[in-house]
Structures are given as C-alpha cells and as structure tokens.
Amino acid sequence: MSKNKRVTISINNDIDLDFRKLASNKMLFKTGWYSKAIEEAMLLWIEKENK
C-alpha cells in the first residue's frame, strides 16, 4: 500500500466551490471525500494527458 502525501495548493475560490459541490454530491461526504475526489480528478487528468 502506498503512503499518502499531504500537499498545500492555492486555487480560485469559484473553481473550488464548484468542485466541492459536485464532489460532495458524488462522494456523499464520506470520510476523506475531498481527498478522494481530488485524487480521482488527478488520475483523470493524467489519463487524458497520456493519450
């Protein structure tokens, strides 16, 4: 099992709010929902860029 890495980022407030609204609905506020949503978004971006 790989270790998790804590990171600090700065993003536009409106983008964060839109992302949190969508992610919280999908992840149902389960423990770690925001981290899981960010990880999923990163994996999708990596997949897209590697095509």
Image: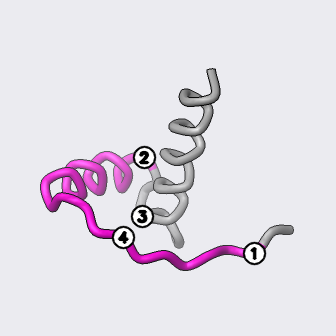
Asked if residue 45 is positioned above or below residue 40 in the image, the reply reads above
- Residue in the image at 36% along x and 56% along y: 24
Query: Which is in the foreground here, disc 1 or disc 2?
Result: 1
Of mark 4 and mark 3, the one earlier in the sequence is: 4
Here the colouring is one colour
- Residue in the image at 49% along x and 75% along y: 7
Mark 3 and mark 2 in contact? Answer it, CB < 8 Å: no
Inspect the magenta stretch and tell me whether residue 25 lies in it. yes
Query: Which is in the foreground here, disc 1 or disc 3?
Result: 1
Residue identifier under label 2: 26
Q: Nearer the viewer, residue 44 or 26?
A: 44
| Residue type for callout 2 | Lys
Q: Secondary structure at mark 4?
A: loop
- In the picture, measured across the screen, residue 50 lies left or right of residue 21, that is right
Q: Secondary structure at mark 1?
A: loop
Of mark 1 and mark 2, the one earlier in the sequence is: 1
Query: Which is in the foreground here, disc 4 or disc 2?
Result: 4
Looking at the rendered structure, which numbered label has been put on residue 29?
A: 3
- The magenta segment is 3-26
- Give the farthest residue toward the right: 1
